[in-house]
C-alpha cells in the first residue's frame, strides 16, 4: 500500500470486503443444502453469522451512502449518474437484507425444513441484486473513486465510517474474517492497515476465537487459512 498521502486512493480493500461476503454467503448455501441438515448448534451458529453479515452489509452501505458517495460527487461531478445507480442499488438491496435477517432469526428459533427453505429463498433473492451491484462497484465505481480521492482522503473515510465506530474486539474479528482464505496480495493489504504491534495482537489474540466460531458454523473440515503463495 502506498504511504504517499497524495497518491491516488488504493481501493483494493473494497474488493476484499466484497469477496468475504460472497465467500460466506456461498458457504451458508452449501451448509443449508447439504445431504444432512445442520444440527441444532450449527444451525444457531449459522443464523447468528448471517445476522452479523447482514448488519455488516447494512453498515457498509450506510458508510458509502453517507460518507463516500457525497465526497466523490463533490470531487467528480461527472460521476453523478453512476453514483445515482450505486444509491439506487443500495435501496433495492436494503429490503433483501431485512428479509434475510428475519429469515435467519426464524431459522435460529426453528430447525424446520420450512425455516431452512426460507433462509435459502431469502439468500437467493439477496444475491440476485447484491452480486451484480458488487461487480458494478468493483469494475466501474472503484476506479473512479481511486482517481477522485487521494490516499489520505480514502484513509480518512475508512477511519471515520468503518474503524472508529467499532471496538478492538469487533475489528479483530473482522480482520480474521477478511483474511479467511485470502490470497497473499490481499493478505498484505489487510494486515498493512494496522501498525506492527497492534497487528501482532490482532492476528494472534483473536485467531482462536475466529477458528472456533468458523468450526461451529461451517464444520471442522472447512479451511479458513489464508491461501499459500
Image (cartoon, rainbow, N blue to C red):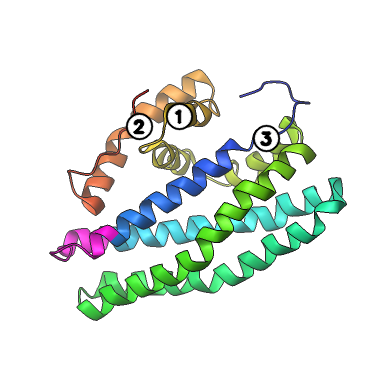
Residues 149 and 197: in front is 149
Which residue appears farthest toward the bottom when viewing the image?
A: 114
Query: Viewed as shown, does residue 76 lie left or right of 34?
Result: right
Whole-angstrom CA distance, mark 1 to mark 3, is 18 Å
Q: Please tell me which of labels 1 and 3 falls first in the chain.
A: 3
Look at the numbered disc 2 and give the secondary structure of its residue: loop
Q: Residues within 10 Å of mark 1 (few under 14, many from 20)?
A: some
Is mark 1 in CB contact (under 8 Å) with mark 2? Answer: yes
Q: Mark 3 points at which residue?
A: 155
Q: Name the residue under label 1.
A: 187
Q: Where is residue 225 in the image (x, y as percent from the top left)?
A: 30, 33
- Residue at figure coordinates x 77%, y 38% from the top left: 147
Is mark 2 in CB contact (under 8 Å) with mark 3? Answer: no
- Residue at figure coordinates x 61%, y 54% from the top left: 136
Q: How many marks?
A: 3
Q: Can residue 58 be seen in this view?
A: no
Look at the numbered disc 1 and give the secondary structure of its residue: helix
Q: Where is residue 95 in the image (x, y as percent from the top left)?
A: 53, 74
Query: Viewed as shown, does residue 143 lie left or right of 169?
Result: right
Q: How crowded is mark 2: few (under 14 residues within 10 Å), some or many (20 or more)?
A: some
In the rendered image, residue 26 lying in the magenta stretch gets the answer no
Image quarter in which the N terminus is found = top right
Look at the numbered disc 3 and give the secondary structure of its residue: helix
- Residue at figure coordinates x 74%, y 58% from the top left: 82
Q: Residues within 10 Å of mark 3 (few under 14, many from 20)?
A: some
Q: Please tell me which of labels 1 and 2 falls first in the chain.
A: 1
Residues 218 and 185: in front is 185
Q: Where is residue 142 in the image (x, y as percent from the top left)?
A: 67, 44
The residue stretch that appears in magenta = 30-44
Q: Which of marks 2 and 3 is in front?
A: 2
Image quarter in which the C terminus is found = top left
Q: Mark 2 points at which residue?
A: 226
Amino acid at each position: 500500500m502506498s504511504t504517499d498521502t497524495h497518491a491516488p486512493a488504493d481501493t483494493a480493500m473494497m474488493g476484499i470486503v466484497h469477496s468475504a461476503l460472497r465467500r460466506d454467503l456461498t458457504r451458508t448455501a452449501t451448509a443449508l443444502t447439504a445431504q444432512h441438515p445442520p444440527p441444532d448448534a450449527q444451525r444457531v451458529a449459522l443464523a447468528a453469522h448471517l445476522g452479523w453479515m447482514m448488519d455488516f452489509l447494512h453498515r457498509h452501505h450506510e458508510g458509502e451512502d453517507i460518507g463516500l458517495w457525497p465526497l466523490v460527487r463533490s470531487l467528480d461531478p461527472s460521476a453523478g449518474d453512476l453514483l445515482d445507480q450505486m444509491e439506487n442499488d443500495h435501496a433495492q438491496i436494503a429490503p433483501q437484507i431485512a428479509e434475510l435477517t428475519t429469515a435467519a432469526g426464524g431459522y435460529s428459533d426453528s430447525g424446520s425444513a420450512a425455516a431452512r427453505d426460507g433462509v435459502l429463498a431469502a439468500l437467493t433473492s439477496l444475491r440476485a441484486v447484491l452480486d451484480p451491484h458488487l461487480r458494478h462497484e468493483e469494475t466501474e465505481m472503484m476506479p473512479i473513486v481511486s482517481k477522485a480521492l487521494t490516499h489520505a482522503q480514502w484513509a480518512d473515510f475508512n477511519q471515520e465510517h468503518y474503524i472508529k465506530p467499532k471496538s478492538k474486539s469487533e475489528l479483530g474479528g473482522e480482520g480474521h474474517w477478511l483474511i479467511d482464505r485470502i490470497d497473499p496480495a490481499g493478505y498484505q493489504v489487510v494486515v498493512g492497515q494496522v501498525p506492527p504491534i497492534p497487528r501482532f495482537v490482532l492476528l494472534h489474540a483473536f485467531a482462536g476465537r475466529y477458528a472456533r466460531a468458523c468450526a461451529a458454523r461451517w464444520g471442522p473440515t472447512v479451511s479458513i487459512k489464508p491461501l499459500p503463495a
